[in-house]
Image (cartoon, rainbow, N blue to C red):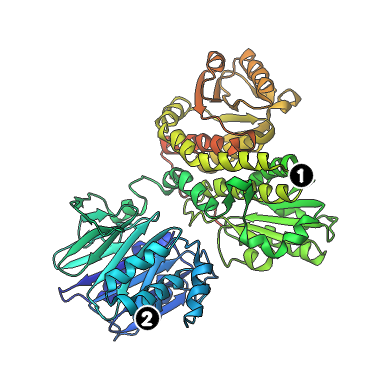
Amino acid sequence: MCGIFAYTGQNGKDAAKVLLDGLVSLEYRGYDSAGIFTPESGVIKTPGAVAELRKRVPKKYSGKSGIAHLRWATHGEPTKVNAHPHGSGAIWLVHNGIIENFKELKKKLVTKGHAFVSDSDTEILAHLIEEHLKRERSFEKATLKALKEVRGTYGVAIQYKGEPEKLIAARMGSPIVLGIGKGEHFIASDPSPILKHTKKVLFLNDGEVAVLTPKSHTVYKLSKEIVHRMPEELDWSAEEAQKGGYEHFMLKEIMEAPEVVVNTLRGRLIPEKGMAKLGGLEAVAKELANIERIIIVACGTAYYAGLIGEYMLEEFAGIPVEVELGSEFRYRSPVLNQRTAVIAISQSGETLDTLEAVREGKRKGALTLGIVNAVGSTIARETDAGVYNHAGPEIGVASTKAFVSQLIALALFTIFLGRQREMSVKTGREIAKELKALPKKLEKVLAGRKEFEKFAKKYKNARDFLFIGRKYNNPVAFEGALKLKEISYIHAEGYGAGEMKHGPIAMIDKDFPTFAIATKDSVYEKNVSNIHELKARKGPVIVLATEGDKEIAKLADDVVYVPKTLEMLSPILNVVPLQLFAYYFAKGKGLNPDRPRNLAKSVTVE
């Protein structure tokens, strides 16, 4: 999820100023590194965000057209050399997405004499276009040929020094919008940097390519067929554009769950073999095959993801797993050795307590692994190997989409380790098939989000809330309670449903509602019994149930349905309704769910 902005015009505007100002509107999309290119003044790149880039752009730097970028690292650390724009000869481009076949393309290009300067997958595309340009002698034709060779996702803006007023944009799985002005045109990853110049926009669809000059814009399909589509008029502010038209980043990020699943899975599943390909673990695959014990360390929401991972890994990979709070791990004397793997889970990759747990693991000879969202973060650098989430930046303080991506990464890790051991091909195929089906099922859950707004309104005066679940969904209950606490500031507790009679049931009365996770799984009947216990004490109950379960609706005060999935993957579907409930609950109380009081996005101190 990087920020792309490009401009070409003949109105006397300085492209450098237009691009730098526009990048400010895109800073929510990436802040690892930034860069700018104009044919007249060349390229400037730097680690950090727009403020750092501005410091390095000299006063004489200018142009009539150009491209600019804010990076959220996916391949390669957030360094100056890996920052965009990337170029080869007279071709320069900025890119959002992942080129899956970059290794094979790079190998082919090296044999043809191309020399690469970065670790980024993006650079391959610049070299590929340049290679085709040698034969085609046409910027457009060379670009189309190169794009047809690429597998993966891209939102891209491309410039050729030989035709400096011309820009080419293309989209495959990563958003691109064109701004249609008078004597000027724009390309961006979302409308926010465009709206101060024009409200007329045209959104590209997958497989479409646009050629822009100051006076014209033409949209083609990759097959070269011209697309006839009129621009639309947007009545959005720049801030609304950043949020994709949603009122808050938290809601936008909840709604991105299907896309996050696709991005975390991309290029990593081999469904026909029931296997997972995790490039970040290839170097330590032999060591992992001999691991006898796993310790997962994490804090907050990531800790709850780890608890779900514990169930996955023990059931399907047959490895003993312990889950530890990063904040407690280094204050005990953990027993670790070379047959132990320590897995650190952290969205930011900078969580201090989790980082110190990694360092403790290394001191004692354990294999250290990371599941992190931020490429080049400290945990990513200091672990022996790991898996990146590819969830994109998460702006809302209360984690939502990162939690979903962590569960997908843990499911992939489970397949990877399971197939090294006793997991059958049949089981691997079943899990892979259901992982691929999750995005559509999540879309169905999200389509019913207005139900959660209704429930939030009904229970808005509650001062206490209980969340209960069992087995895989026990940690989901903890996460549901945490979300409500974080952004609504009311007392909420997550409990294993089997622990009800060991204390919590004493609190239940007509004013103490419960959100019960009771989807159809191996502990369904147990959950139903717990709901009966709550109702016997006149406690209001919202039940999260599996589609088609009409019987449980007779027992519940309110019921929410989700599609059926494998038990090990049910937390991925079940957590989204709890996130939505917390969001609408906070909104109904007039609170800002994006910026809960007293909390920071990344905890880098004790």
Q: In what quadrant of the picture does the C terminus appear?
A: bottom right
> What residue lies at 40% left-to-right and 60% top-to-bottom?
154
Q: Nearer the viewer, mark 1 or mark 2?
A: 1
Residue 473 is situated, as x and y percent measured from the top left of the image, at 64, 34
What residue does disc 2 label? 43
Q: Secondary structure at mark 2?
A: strand
x%, y% of residue 457? 43, 28
Res. 122 image quadrant: bottom left
Amino acid carrying label 1: it is: Glu
Quadrant placement of the N terminus: bottom left
Identify residue type, mark 2.
Answer: Val
Placement of 447 over or under 240, stated as above or below: above
Give the CA distance from mark 1 to mark 2.
53 Å
Q: Is residue 597 above or below residue 62?
A: above
Q: Position of residue 406 (x, y in %)?
A: 59, 49
Nearer to me, 325 or 382: 382
Reading the image, the residue beneath label 1 is 422
- Determine whether, in the image, residue 392 is placed left or right of residue 313: left
User: Which one is in front, 74 or 242?
Assistant: 74
Residue under the image location 69 percent in, 42 percent down: 312
